[in-house]
Image (spheres, rainbow, N blue to C red):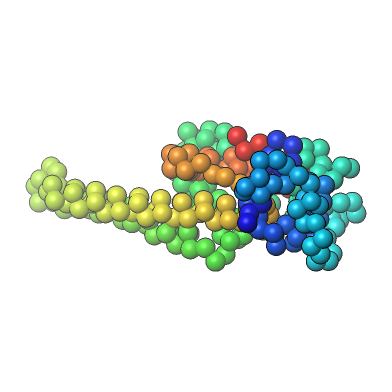
Amino acid sequence: MKYYIQRGVNEYGPYTLADLQRYVAQGNIAMSDLARSEGMTEWVPVSNVLGDIPVPVTTPAVPAGGGTVYGGTSPYGAATAPAMSTGPIPTDFHWALVLLVNFLCGLFRVVWLFIEASFVKKIMPNSNFLVFMVLGKCVEVGAVIGFYVGIGVAAANGHSDPPGAVFLVCFLIGLAGLATLYVGIFKMRAAMEEYYNTVEPINLQLNPLLTFFFPTFYFQHHLSRIAAWKKTGVLAPQG
């Protein structure tokens, strides 16, 4: 059976009963937090769910300078954010600034996407999304180079345009490269959701349409809010 946790307007999960026990032991979930199972309509305290089930004893992480892992005077800080862990802080550069710089340099969007990917690879080293992204982009670039080589060869032979077959082949190769790149992007999305729903459970949910059309800017929006949470203890709504 899966369980969900409610804090203010935010809902987290699903978690197994073992997950609840572990997070309570680590201090990430309080016994007074509200919880419900998939078959329940009413929220009840976590203590009601766990009942007499023993909670394994672990030593919760204590941030430098003392205090609680929640980064506030109340159990969940100023905005009832989940407990901050010791994971790395994401690349913090507002998505609007990424968009602005991209207007000045069209390649910046691609460069920044790979900067974001390098961070996600750091927290999910076993994921192979970066292989697909690099391969896809290399194939795309190769298709463009092949097309211009075809133009050069055609010009050397007295033709103003390359043969239609050259254009078709390069187009198909470029399309295959783009598809491979997007396989990597969606694998990156899955890696982010896996990490931020298990290792640092903040119920991260990434919209597939926004991922498809605006991956660089959309990923950065969420990386920035995660960075702000890790610095301040306040987790902004997903938006």
- The x, y position of residue 228, in whole percent, is 71, 42
> Is residue 100 shown above or below 171?
above
Q: Residue at x 50, y 48 (%)?
A: 113
**Front position in the image: 92 or 128:** 128
Q: Quadrant of the N terminus?
A: bottom right
- The x, y position of residue 218, in whole percent, is 53, 40
Left or right of 222 on screen, residue 180: left
Q: Residue at x 43, y 43 (%)?
A: 212
> Is residue 29 shown above or below 72?
below
Q: Residue at x 54, y 44 (%)?
A: 206
Residue extending farthest to the left is 158
Left or right of 115 on screen, residue 163: left
**Front position in the image: 82 or 37:** 37
**Front position in the image: 143 or 43:** 43
Q: Quadrant of residue 138?
A: bottom left
> Is residue 119 shown above or below 77?
below
Q: Quadrant of residue 205?
A: top right
- The x, y position of residue 21, in whole percent, is 75, 60
Q: Residue at x 35, y 51 (%)?
A: 179
